[in-house]
């Protein structure tokens, strides 16, 4: 591992439970994970999306199908860490403790996670805490939070209290309540002030605990800290779709075309943003959610970042194979992303797996957005193993992903057996198993050729060797799934299935015997420590190397905006081995007069890198200019499926599958 690399754990937080958890891993557990892994040399923790789900059971298990990406999921609150808990009298505290004890007794021995039971008990406890008196200082802080969040928070809370009565899908509500800006919704909120306040209070508590988790990570020595995951979209009947109904396309769902691993394609059951309406709004919905995600984070992973360029649109009722690509103004959208990352001093990782245009990867690379490399998928043009030294530098490299089984199971071919059992294969299982065996064997030969394993290595030895192999790559960030480190075997998510077919997102963190393990036991695991040693320890800053000493200067009073390098990465710097700054060499990249033309737009490409623009305010203005130009270019659009079909051939941002 070089001084320019850093590594961290990828964690499905809901599955990483401790003895203090209420059946689901929470933000207290995240702070513990961060402190512990920093001691092993990790620079960051990458967590699953913590987006808001439904306010009452039944709760959607997938973190990638949230009600809102703009707000957080109170399922992750650590009840006992809410300051008002300590101020309760003995009887009130005993009541909350009894709720937790009864829940743990109910969940004991269960093989799958039960979000509904966990959230029902936790919500009851939080309602008690909400009624507890707050100190004057905390009351002032709460009111300031509500004022800063504004109308967005109030409308999110309104959707929550309406859904408790009318169901979790606003499309099935009475007609007069389907309009978030309508008089009926406003009247209902005014008549249920206490319930509305509770929903807003939950977001304030989450904000505090997210801040505490990031502070714990940085205090423990992490250079980056918590990296949040941003899902592709939202539930079509959820809070965001209700609040910003005019921005979403009706009668359309987002997914992915068929590929080698998902041979029937994917339908993610999410409505896409309309490119024209998004541009008309000045990309405000994108800016707002990015700003909130990055508020208490050192970075963000953008799931399916190619969705900022194009998305696979599927008319409702059609199969994924019948979809088509809809194009977006990526210059404007990535401009907003760069502006918010610069503002927060955060690293940006884009999940760019699957069908990706080479020009898109190049565009992201030029702007310092890291890509994603998964070891099993790294092959050259002839299908042979691509040596680690030839992997991309600007990327996060990992052995596996949450859409594959943990490596301990992958090495035994459990993913082939599972897909056959679920009817997801398009060829006989014998052919699929043989092809899969050859793929795995080619990687075993690569490891043997490097002297990393012997002829009869165990799965545990292979897992350590695979992560040692990652350090041979030039990739700036390395990643290990906590499930791999502990020896888990079961698939967390099987694409192309629903809850009736497979318990997606409900698998608890488990050991090699497939029995659930608690976080308390993981912290002392020698198996995990061996993987951490294979990855090595962080020796510097991933994009800029060891930090240079600077002259001490007197600081001005008041808060200071974090610089990108304070989190270890500059999200918007171009690829270069020369630190930026005129005293350290010329700034990389073309000069202003040399900007290349973008044939699709008929205008120069804009470079939103901080090195070229220099200030957040200017970045934001440039992003707005792109948004305004995109709005002027937008064509007429019908929100009905028939209109979509009629305008598809002529719309500039919607093109058929190549």
Image (spheres, rainbow, N blue to C red):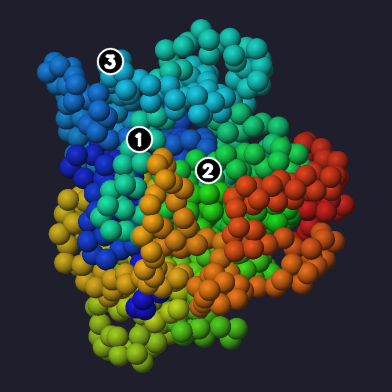
Callouts 3 and 1 close, C-beta under 8 Å: no
Relative to 200, is 257 on the left or the right? Answer: right
Label whose residue precedes the other's in the sequence (1 or 2): 1
Q: Say whether residue 295 is left or right of residue 124.
A: right
- Image coordinates of residue 320 in percent, x first then y, are 65, 53
Q: Which residue is mark 2?
A: 291
The residue sitting at 50% across, 24% down in the picture is: 147
| Image point (53%, 49%), residue name | 343
What residue sits right under mark 3 in the picture? 133
Q: Secondary structure at mark 1?
A: helix
Q: Residue 637 versus residue 165: which sits nearer the camera? A: 637
| 2 or 3: tag closer to the N-terminus | 3
Q: Which residue is mark 1?
A: 208
Between marks 2 and 3, how big is the CA–CA gap? 31 Å
Is residue 585 in sight in this rendering? yes
Gap in angstroms between the C-alphas marked 3 and 1: 17 Å
The reply to whether the C-beta atoms of the residues labelled 1 and 2 are less than 8 Å apart is no
Mark 2 is surrounded, within 10 Å at the Cα level, by few (under 14), some (14 to 19) or many (20 or more) other residues, namely some
Q: Earlier in the sequence, mark 3 or mark 1?
A: 3
* 412 up-or-down from 121: above or below: below
Q: Position of residue 275 (x, y in %)?
A: 73, 45
The correct choice, above or below, for 470 with respect to 193 in the image is below
The correct choice, above or below, for 609 with respect to 442 in the image is above
Displayed quadrant of residue 305: bottom right
- Tags 2 and 3 touching, CB below 8 Å: no
Q: SS at mark 3?
A: loop
Q: Residue at x 49, y 49 (%)?
A: 344
**Classed neighbour count for the residue bearing mark 3: other residues with Cα under 10 Å, few (<14), some (14–19), many (≥20):** few
Between 405 and 153, the residue placed more toward the observer is: 153
């Amino acid at each position: 591992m070089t001084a320019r690399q850093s590594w961290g754990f990828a964690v499905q937080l809901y599955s990483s439970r401790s003895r203090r958890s209420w059946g689901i891993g929470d933000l207290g557990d995240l702070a513990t994970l961060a402190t512990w892994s920093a001691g092993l040399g990790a620079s960051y923790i990458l967590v699953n999306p913590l987006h808001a789900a439904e306010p009452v059971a039944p709760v959607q298990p997938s973190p990638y199908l949230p009600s809102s990406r703009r707000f957080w999921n109170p399922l992750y609150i650590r009840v006992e860490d809410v300051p008002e808990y300590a101020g309760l009298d003995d009887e009130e505290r005993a009541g909350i403790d009894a709720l937790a004890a009864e829940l743990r007794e109910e969940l004991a021995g269960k093989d799958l996670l039960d979000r509904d039971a966990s959230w029902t008990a936790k919500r009851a406890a939080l309602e008690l805490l909400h009624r507890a008196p707050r100190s004057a200082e905390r009351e002032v802080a709460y009111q300031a939070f509500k004022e800063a969040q504004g109308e967005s928070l109030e409308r999110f809370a309104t959707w929550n209290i309406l859904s408790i009565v009318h169901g979790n899908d606003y499309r099935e509500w009475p007609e007069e309540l389907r309009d978030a800006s309508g008089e009926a919704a406003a009247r209902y909120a005014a008549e249920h002030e206490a319930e509305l306040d509770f929903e807003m209070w939950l977001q304030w508590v989450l904000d505090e605990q997210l801040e505490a988790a990031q502070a714990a990570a940085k205090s423990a020595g992490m250079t980056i800290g918590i990296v949040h995951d941003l899902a592709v979209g939202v539930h079509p009947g959820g809070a965001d779709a209700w609040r910003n109904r005019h921005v979403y396309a009706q009668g359309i769902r987002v997914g992915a075309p068929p590929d080698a691993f998902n041979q029937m394609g994917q339908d993610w059951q999410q409505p896409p943003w309309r490119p024209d309406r998004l541009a008309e709004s000045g990309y405000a919905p994108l800016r707002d959610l990015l700003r909130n995600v990055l508020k208490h984070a050192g970075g963000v992973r953008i799931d399916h970042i190619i969705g900022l360029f194009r998305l696979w649109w599927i008319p409702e009722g059609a199969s994924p194979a019948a979809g088509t690509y809809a194009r977006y103004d990526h210059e404007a959208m990535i401009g907003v992303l760069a502006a918010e990352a610069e503002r927060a001093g955060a690293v940006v990782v884009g999940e760019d797996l699957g069908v990706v245009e080479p020009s898109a990867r190049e565009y992201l690379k030029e702007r310092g957005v890291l890509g994603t490399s998964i070891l099993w998928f790294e092959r050259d043009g002839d299908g042979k193993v691509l040596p680690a030294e030839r992997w991309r530098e600007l990327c996060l490299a990992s052995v596996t992903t949450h859409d594959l089984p943990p490596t301990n199971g992958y090495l035994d071919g459990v993913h082939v057996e599972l897909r056959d059992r679920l009817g997801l294969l398009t060829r006989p299982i014998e052919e699929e198993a043989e092809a899969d065996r050859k793929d795995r064997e080619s990687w075993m030969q690569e490891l043997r050729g490097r002297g990393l394993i012997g002829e009869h290595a165990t799965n545990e030895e292979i897992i350590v060797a695979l992560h040692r192999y990652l350090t041979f790559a030039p990739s700036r960030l390395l990643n290990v799934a906590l499930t791999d480190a502990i020896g888990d075997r079961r698939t967390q998510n099987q694409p192309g299935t629903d809850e009736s077919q497979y318990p997606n997102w409900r698998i608890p963190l488990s050991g090699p015997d497939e029995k659930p393990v608690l976080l308390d036991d993981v912290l002392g695991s020698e198996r995990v420590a061996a993987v951490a040693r294979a990855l090595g320890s962080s020796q510097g800053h991933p994009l800029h190397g060891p930090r240079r000493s600077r002259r001490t200067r007197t600081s001005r009073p008041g808060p200071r905006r974090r610089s990108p390098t304070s989190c270890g990465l500059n999200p918007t710097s171009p690829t270069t081995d020369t630190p930026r700054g005129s005293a350290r060499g010329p700034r990389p990249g073309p000069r202003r007069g040399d900007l290349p033309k973008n044939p699709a737009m008929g205008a120069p490409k804009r470079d939103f890198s901080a090195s070229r623009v220099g200030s957040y305010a200017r970045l934001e203005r440039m992003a707005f200019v792109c948004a305004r130009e995109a709005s002027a270019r937008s064509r007429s659009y019908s929100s009905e499926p028939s209109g979509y079909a009629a305008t598809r051939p002529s719309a500039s941002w919607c093109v058929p599958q190549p």
